[in-house]
Image (spheres, grey):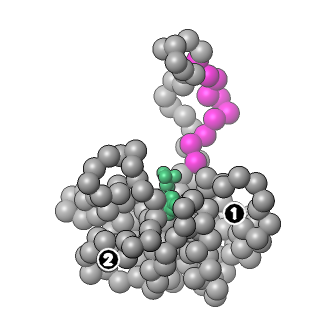
């Protein structure tokens, strides 16, 4: 059983502003990417780590890793879906894949444990958080408060049985999927 983490870091991260894409920004002296890689590297269930970077950003990524070693660095695409596909293509021997956004630095080990455990009887599993904040549909402030009872915030890592996510990528014909 091989469990591979794919960390996608090929986005422009423009919404966050800053001189470099947000995944390369530093927090506590270490890049967000390095924090994410460290979380997987420290987890005993993870066998391989693949980092997906933007075209021409391999040097930036290596510098941001600051000496951390990963198994592969591959180039992603214009949409996150393409970047994920590039990571999957670099993991032909994986039985389980954990796909993670580089800009999320803190991954509790227990979340990784629970995702992997869920794959014992599910094809995929994602971390989902209930909405705590009040939601309002704009532009009028509090003009139209949205019922949050059934709303969840979906985070990463997102875990899949590898053959299932490979098939999903092959079969998907809709617009670029965000996750
Ligand atoms: O832009 P967004 O917040 O959706 O990006 C989520 C994650 O996907 C980020 O880690 C980003 O680097 C990655 N991404 C990517 N390739 C893209 C777009 C986003 O790897 N083309």
* Image: 142 above or below 16: above
Q: Nearer the viewer, mark 1 or mark 2?
A: 2
Residue 164 or residue 47, whichever sits in front: 164
Q: Residues within 10 Å of mark 2 (few under 14, many from 20)?
A: few
x, y percentage for residue 23? 36, 60
- Looking at the image, how many numbered discs can be counted on the residues? 2
Q: Look at the numbered disc 2 and give the secondary structure of its residue.
A: helix
Q: Is 126 within the magenta? A: no
Q: Which residues are magenta?
A: 145-154
Q: Which residue is mark 2?
A: 59
Q: Earlier in the sequence, mark 1 or mark 2?
A: 2
* Residue 121 in sight here: no
Q: Quadrant of residue 31?
A: bottom left
The answer to whether residue 103 is left or right of residue 114 is left
* Image: 141 above or below 98: above
Q: Which residue is mark 1?
A: 124
């Amino acid at each position: 059983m091989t469990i591979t983490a794919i960390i996608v870091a090929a986005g422009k991260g423009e919404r966050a502003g800053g001189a470099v894409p947000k995944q390369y920004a530093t927090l506590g002296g270490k890049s967000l990417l390095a924090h994410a890689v460290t979380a997987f590297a420290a987890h005993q269930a993870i066998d391989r780590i693949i980092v997906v970077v933007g075209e021409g950003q391999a040097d930036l990524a290596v510098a941001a890793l600051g000496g951390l070693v990963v198994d592969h660095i591959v180039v992603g695409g214009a949409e996150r879906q393409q970047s994920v596909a590039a990571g999957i293509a670099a993991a032909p021997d994986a039985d389980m894949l954990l796909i993670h956004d580089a800009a999320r630095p803190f991954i509790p080990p227990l979340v990784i444990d629970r995702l992997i455990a869920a794959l014992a009887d599910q094809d995929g599993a994602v971390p989902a958080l209930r909405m705590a904040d009040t939601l309002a549909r704009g532009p009028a402030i509090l003009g139209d408060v949205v019922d949050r009872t059934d709303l969840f915030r979906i985070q990463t890592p997102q875990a899949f049985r590898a053959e299932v996510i490979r098939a999903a990528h092959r079969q998907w014909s809709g617009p670029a999927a965000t996750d």
